[in-house]
Structure formats: C-alpha cells, structure tokens
C-alpha cells in the first residue's frame, strides 16, 4: 500500500483519514438512498492508497463514514417510535456505527499485518479478510449483516446471478478484488505477484458476467404456479396498537382482501403483526379475521402475536405468522426465529432490567424454529421482518422443503427513509441465492413479488393503501449456494485464522533460535 496523500497533510490534519472518510461516503453511495452500485468497484481505492501507516484508524474512519449515512434512519425509529430523546438516539446511533466500523478497522489492520509478516499483497488477502469479517458481523452478538458490500450488485442483472454460487459474500469478494486491482494499477506494480492478481481479477469478473448472462436464459422447465394477493394495509405505527383503531384496521384488510380475491388471488398475504390481538382467544376481532378466508374461499396468511402458557403459570410470547384454510381451519403457525435485540427482546434481560424495548407488545418475545407451513400440497417458508437479511435462515427454510418464501414485514418504523428499499434489496438477494420466488407483504410498503433472478414485480409505493396480485412459481431451481451454504466465508475465517497461527508459529521459532 501507499501513503500518497500523507505529504499534503497540513500539520493538524491527517489526510489519510480524510481519504478513508471519502471512501466511506463513496461506499454509502452504492446503497439506497443513492443506489449507485457501480461505486462498489471503486469506493475503497482512496482508503487502500492512504491506509499504510495507520490501517486500523483509516479502516475505522471509513466504516464510520459508511455506516452513519447508511443507517441514518435508525434515528427515525428511536425518536418517533422508540420514545428516545434526540440526544440519546444520536448517541445510540453513533455507538452502533462505531461498533460496526471496528470490522473495517480490523480488516485493514489484518491486511497490513499479513503483508508485513508473510509478504502477501492486499489483492490476495483483503478479499478473504473482508468476507470473513462480514460473516462474523452477521453472527456475533446476534448478528447485524446490514450493508454487506455484495448488495451493491443488486441492480446489475448479470453480476447478481452469481449469488446462487457463493451467496452475497461471493459478490463482496469480487467487489473487494476489483478495488485491490485498481490500487495495483494506480501504483503501477509490475512484479509477478501483482500481475497474477490483476489477471485473476479480470478472469473472475469476466467469468461472473458470462455466468450471469447464461443464468438468465430460459430453461424450458415448467413449475406449478399460484396467484397471490399482497395486502398493504398502510396502518400508521402510532395507530397499530391503539384499540380505538382496531375495527378500522380490520375493515381495511377485509375490503382489500375481497378485492384481491376478485382478481384471482388464491393466497391472501397480510403483513407482519396485522392483528394487534391474540388469535388464540375467541373474540369478535378474531372472528372477523376467520371470516375472510371463509367469505373469499381463499387461503389467508397473516402476522400477529401469539402466546403459550407454561406449567408454572407464566407465558411465552411469539411474533408469529398464521395460515388459515378456506374453511377457517388453522393450518399452521410459524414463529419468528431471529428477534430484534432491544426491539423484541432485551439481551441479558436480568442484568439490563432497566432497559425498555423499542416496540409495543406484551413481554419479551421467544424465538421459534424453522417450520414451513403446509398449504395444498406445497410448503411455505415465512421470514418475518428483518429475518430476510440473514442468508442462512432463508436457506434453512428452502432446505426444509419450502416451495415459496414469504416475507411479512412492517416497515412503518422506518418512515419515508431509504430503509424499506435497503431491506427489499436484501430480500431480493435471498431469492437469487436460493433460486426461489419470494412474496413480500409490507404494512406500509414496499410490497413486491420477487423472481428467482432477483427481479421485483408489482412493487408498491410506500405509505399507500392497496392490494396487488400476481403469479408466482412454486419450487426452487438448482442452486450451488443452497447446497454448500456459507462455505466461502467459513473458509475465509479459517484461512485468516490459519495465517495468524502460522505467523505465531514462525515468530515462536525465531524466538527459540535467537
């Protein structure tokens, strides 16, 4: 690496960190709000050129200037719906961004460390380091894999198809490889190692584009089809749990469902937490919900809270999805597995008893298990809310036999921000990875039908009340990712760990010899 910009430092200002900040902003531009995915190929070049002497600090600053604009909408969630004062919301937002930026800092530090100790050029180390740390970020402390670099390819029809090989992590590796290649070209490195890296990048990028082009060709295989109706009730968050608005909510969903049924929908899908009451309890409210499949003669899938009574008299609560048959029979219930920390439960609740959750509801929710819902000879895998950002969870549902993935979500929390688009883009990647259709019903939008190639159909505007219908195909297509899962990032973790062990071993031998 080089520190070209260091000579322009005006004394008190470290221009290396300015270059790192610029890289972070460029990288944020690859995602919605701006959605300029091509920036993913070049955004990290200033960082890599300037981070030689202060790699951790440069990486941390880059991460901070990436995550801060990417996640600005968290302040809307915490102030408008979480009840936090703006000052404390700002502190929490910055704290989260700083935590996530540590992964960027660690990546750059490891690159320089491996280059110094094992003479490995960044083009051969950083792609694997980056993927390994993205994977760890998605699993440590419950995981938060938001803004993985590979998502920058979501609007690139050919390139995104390679997600069915190694998942979104494979795309992240390709983006990093391209950034490292551009750095070598700027530095005019001509040694054999650098030339080999450049050749490898060009070859891999060309192969990915050719594969993507081929993947979009019709296969001629026919799959069973079904018409689904996505019902977007557009219930504002402040009214969702207000009992005075409950009848208005039910009337709206009933009216929209009747319209979707008239347009031929065989399965009506309502969003997450549509029913602000417990369907297990017999009431006039639950009876009104049961009437919808009976009157329409259609299946109904909807989200709502549920509970189970325990032997000691206590209760266990779930964020659930219910499937009703046309005869009002409850065909099954699927409970949310990956809960939102501080939203649906408080981590270490006994120690952090003074911390309140950010969402309304009774008690802490309990996670469920992967359990597809059987409907008319086919299985439905339900991802509730931000479960769609976890690649392994969507894969688990398809591995368990799901013929269609359904994402029920309530994006009202995000207001008129870029978060609904970011979440939709991540859901689209799950469709490509598993080569399966996804039906996404969102309370305030964006609802859509997502094809196995990542294209989104019937997209709805946010904060509009409507129902849309469309055809989906049932059954997954072939996918290498579905077979091997996250083999690439796991391999990357062990590869980097092996390099560190090797360095420790070589250093120990040098000490003994000395």
Image (cartoon, helix red, strand yellow):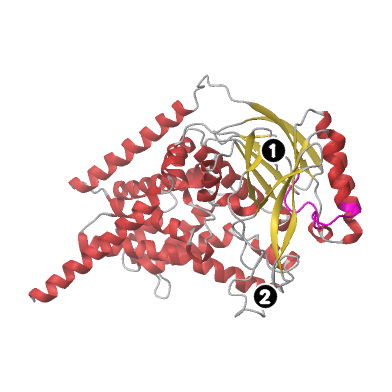
**Residues at badges 1 and 2 in contact (C-beta under 8 Å)?**
no
Marks 1, 2: nearer the viewer: 1
Q: Secondary structure at mark 1?
A: loop
Q: Quadrant of residue 470?
A: top right
- Say which residue appears at 73% left-offset and 40% top-offset: 460
Looking at the image, which is closer to me, 61 or 296?
296
| Looking at the image, residue 186 lies above or below residue 510 | above
Farthest-out residue, left: 513
Q: Number of callouts in the render?
A: 2
Q: Which residues are magenta?
A: 270-285
Residue 144 belongs to magenta span = no
Residue 280 belongs to magenta span = yes
Residue 56 located left or right of residue 288: left
- Say which residue appears at 40% left-offset and 58% top-offset: 47
Farthest-out residue, front: 311
| Looking at the image, residue 159 lies above or below residue 333 | above
Mark linked to residue 459:
1
The crowd level at tag 2 (other Cα within 10 Å; few <14, some 14-19, many 20+) is few
The crowd level at tag 1 (other Cα within 10 Å; few <14, some 14-19, many 20+) is some
| Looking at the image, residue 356 lies above or below residue 196 | below
- Residue 499, how many percent across, how many down? 26, 60
Reading the image, the residue beneath label 2 is 87
- Residue 496, how many percent across, how many down? 31, 59
Q: Secondary structure at mark 2?
A: helix
- Say which residue appears at 78% left-offset and 48% top-offset: 463
Residue 416 visible somewhere in the drawing: no
- Say which residue appears at 88% left-offset and 47% top-offset: 288
Query: Which quadrant is home to the N terminus?
Result: bottom left
């Amino acid at each position: 690496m080089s520190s070209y910009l260091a000579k322009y430092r005006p004394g008190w200002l470290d221009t290396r960190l300015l270059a790192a900040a610029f890289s972070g902003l460029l990288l944020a531009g690859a995602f919605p709000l701006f959605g300029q995915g091509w920036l993913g190929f070049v955004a990290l070049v200033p960082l890599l050129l300037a981070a030689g002497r202060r790699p951790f600090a440069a990486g941390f600053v880059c991460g901070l200037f990436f995550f801060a604009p990417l996640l600005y909408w968290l302040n809307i969630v915490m102030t408008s719906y979480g009840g936090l004062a703006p000052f404390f919301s700002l502190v929490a937002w910055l704290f989260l961004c700083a935590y996530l930026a540590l992964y960027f800092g660690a990546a750059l530090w490891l690159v320089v460390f491996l280059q110094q100790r094992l003479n490995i050029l960044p083009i051969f180390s950083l792609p694997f380091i980056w993927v390994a740390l993205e994977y760890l970020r998605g699993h440590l402390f419950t995981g938060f894999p938001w803004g993985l670099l590979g998502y920058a390819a979501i609007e690139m029809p050919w390139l995104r198809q390679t997600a069915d090989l190694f998942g979104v992590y494979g795309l992240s590796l390709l983006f990093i490889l391209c950034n490292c290649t551009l750095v070598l070209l700027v530095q005019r490195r001509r040694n054999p190692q650098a030339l080999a890296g450049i050749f490898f990048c060009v070859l891999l990028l060309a192969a990915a584009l050719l594969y993507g082009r081929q993947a979009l060709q019709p296969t001629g295989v026919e799959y069973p089809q079904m018409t689904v109706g996505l019902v977007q009730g557009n219930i504002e968050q402040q009214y969702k749990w207000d009992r005075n608005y409950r009848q208005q909510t039910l009337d709206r969903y009933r009216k929209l469902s009747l319209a979707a049924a008239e347009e031929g929908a065989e399965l009506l899908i309502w969003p997450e937490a549509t029913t602000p009451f417990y369907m297990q309890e017999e009431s006039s409210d639950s009876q009104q919900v049961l009437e919808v499949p009976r009157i329409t003669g259609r299946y109904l899938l909807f989200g709502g809270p549920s509970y189970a009574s325990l032997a000691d008299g206590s209760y266990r609560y779930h964020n659930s999805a219910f499937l009703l048959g046309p005869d009002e029979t409850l065909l099954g219930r699927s409970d949310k597995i990956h809960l939102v920390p501080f939203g649906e439960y408080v981590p270490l609740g006994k120690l952090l008893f003074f911390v309140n959750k950010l969402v309304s509801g009774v008690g802490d929710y309990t996670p469920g298990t992967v359990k597809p819902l059987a409907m008319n000879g086919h299985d439905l895998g339900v991802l509730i809310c931000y479960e769609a950002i976890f690649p392994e969870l969507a894969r688990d549902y398809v591995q368990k036999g799901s013929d269609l993935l359904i994402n029920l979500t309530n994006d009202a929390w995000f207001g008129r921000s870029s978060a609904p688009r970011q979440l939709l883009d991540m859901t689209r990647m799950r469709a490509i990875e598993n080569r399966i259709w996804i039906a996404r019903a969102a309370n305030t939008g964006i609802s859509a039908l997502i094809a196995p190639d990542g294209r989104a159909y019937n997209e709805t505007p946010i904060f509009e009340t409507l129902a849309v219908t469309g055809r989906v195909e049932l059954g997954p297509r072939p996918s290498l990712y579905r077979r091997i899962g996250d083999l690439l990032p796991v391999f990357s973790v062990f590869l980097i760990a092996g390099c560190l062990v090797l360095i420790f071993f070589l250093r120990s031998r040098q000490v003994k010899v000395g």
